[in-house]
Amino acid sequence: MALSRGVGPPGGLLPRAGGLYLLKATVELETPGSPVGPARPAFVQDLGARDGAPRMAAGAPEVTVVGKTIRAALYARVSTLAGQNPEMQLAELREYCARRCWDIVGEYMDAGVSGARERRPELDRMLAACRRRQIDAVVVYRYDRFARSLRQLVNALCEFDELGVQFISLHEGVDTSTPNGRLVFGIFATIAEFERELIRERVRSGIAVARSQGKRIGRPCRHMDTARILELRGQGWSWSAIADELDAGLGTVHRAAHKATATTS
């Protein structure tokens, strides 16, 4: 097999409009008993292209690059049904996915549901699909359509990150598939962690003040009829049956019986 360059300026460069040149290469195949001739034209490299991507010469066979298709889920929410329509949100989300050539595998709409509620029918259904690895990207109109509290938003984004699901908020311009989007998410996560630390310190301070005032911390003690417990146990009742009979927890019944036995012994 021999490699020859096309006829043209030195170095095999072919003139092109705009002062650019094309580098053309043809492959000649030599077989016994057959004349040497050029095969079908191969790739033509555009040296002036910005991305440097190879282009096909005229008559060359087409090459199709097969990549992973992104499966997108659209989520929309309106608080009330009076004059609000989630279709306005979905129209922009569909247009965005069309521009990025993403496949829309589901549209989830919570109509008449407050954003303060963390459990919403369509939101829960979408999250379940994400956990089943059926969704690659979640696209929302705005942050407040998806979550009202920073804690809820960060928790959801952390779960998406573990599942490999990208999150796109259209009007805030946040896309976790890009470095800028991941930076914004990191800022949100830092703020949420700071908020959790403040809450933890306030709780600890409140517990310390309550203990200094002689208050008991924890669940209130419940008085149990230990004689009744021991009587039922003596009749062969199981611990779970005794707990159901006295409408108490199994651990509470165990502790009361153990304390009564230790006292009598």
Image: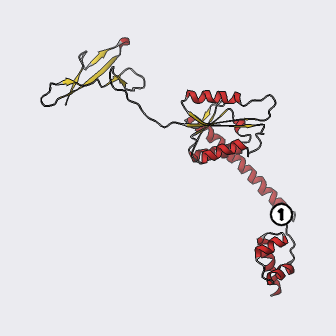
Q: Is residue 51 above or below residue 77?
A: above
Quarter of the figure with the C terminus: bottom right
Residue 229 in the figure: left or right of residue 40: right
Q: Nearer the viewer, residue 111 or 192?
A: 111
Q: Nearer the viewer, residue 88 or 157?
A: 88
| Residue at the far bottom in the pictured view | 265
Residue position marked by numbered label 1 in the rendering: 211
Q: Nearer the viewer, residue 265 or 31?
A: 31
Q: Measured from the top left, where is residue 156 in percent x and y? A: 66, 45
Residue 193 in the figure: left or right of residue 235: left
SS under mark 1: helix
| Residue at the far top in the pictured view | 17
> Which quadrant of the view contains residue 241?
bottom right
Residue at the location (66% across, 41% down)? 188
Q: Is residue 225 visible?
A: yes
Q: The disc labelled 1 sits on which kind of residue?
A: Arg
